[in-house]
Amino acid sequence: MRKIAFYSQKGGTGKTTSCVNVAGALAAAGRRVLIVDLDGNACASRTFDRVVGGKHSVAAALRGDGNLMDIIRSLPVPHLWLAAGSADLRTIHMPGRVADPNRLDRADHLRADILAWELAQMGETIFDYVLLDCPGGNPYMDQAALLACDEVIVPTGLSVYDLYAATPTLQFIALARRARGDGRPEFMGFLPNGAGKSGIPPRMQEKLDSYDAPYFTPVRHSASMKTVAGAREVSLRLIVLAQPDNVAAQSYRQVAREIEIGIEAARKAAPGTAQGDSAPSRAG
């Protein structure tokens, strides 16, 4: 079971859109995928009309009002499940929110490793992938996600201002790796969102190259992304399922392949996918 966080310190980079569409692409390929919504705004949960509260949310599982398996629900998409987010996640770490003393640190805050512990209780064979949709601006949940995941994908917009946020994002990943002491989480690469036919703008490409880090095939811009988001049928709110021939859908499927077998291997298997949309990544 691979646990992958979609994480960035900056808001508006496409974390949720990337997470749910990559999940849809993996599920369409027959992989069993769990989305864990760690955002107090519950954006991933809203995508699937699964906004919940009380004992049915991730917050309840972290508090100990049951366990994570208790709150996981199947979605109307084959091979796809959700652990729903809720507004409780914004303040769950504060004193007085958790009754179980075993889940508290010395300051009476919820321990940051509880999410990792809950995921470990599920075992390694129920799901092929667990995708963590991280919030923007919630340091506790960000830390919990980085302590729980094996790998990190950092979505980014196509402005150099978006990449300015990459430095603190990579620093937090490094801090989590140091705290864990097991070489995890691995930084898999940047995921650029909103590319045109000509690919990544030159200034953005220059800044991206300055990090000397891997990056996934850029997701192409498509006006249809906003259209499908309001579809009546939940399964058709994902561009990968609603319009599989759309350029954005094709991008997400390619990203899913790059996650499965590595960036360079996937690009060699589908020559031309990255060319024209971007320069090749520096690493796989």
Image: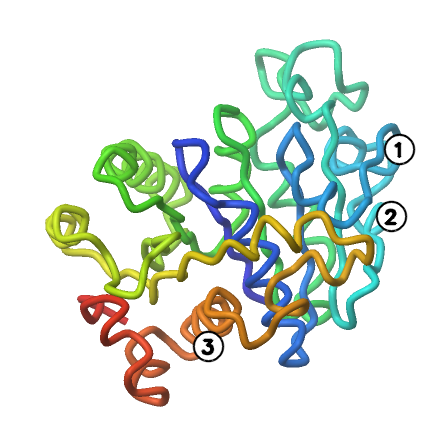
Residues at marks 2 and 1 touching, judged by CB atoms closer than 8 Å = yes
Residue 184 visible in the picture? no
- Picture coordinates of residue 99, whole percent (x, y): 81, 19
- Say which label, 3 or 2, has the lower sequence index: 2
Q: Which of the two labelled residues, at mark 1 and mark 3, occupies the earlier sequence position?
A: 1
Indicate left or right for 106 with 209 as reference: right
Q: Amino acid at mark 1?
A: Lys
**Residue type at tag 3:** Arg
Q: CA distance from mark 2 to mark 1?
A: 9 Å
Observer-nearest residue: 140 or 35? 35
What kind of residue is marked 2?
Asp
Residue located at (66% from left, 50% from top): 229
The label number, if any, that marks residue 55 in the structure image: 1
Residue 275: x %, y % from top left: 23, 76
Describe the element under mark 3 as helix, strand or loop: helix
Classify residue 116 by image quadrant: top right
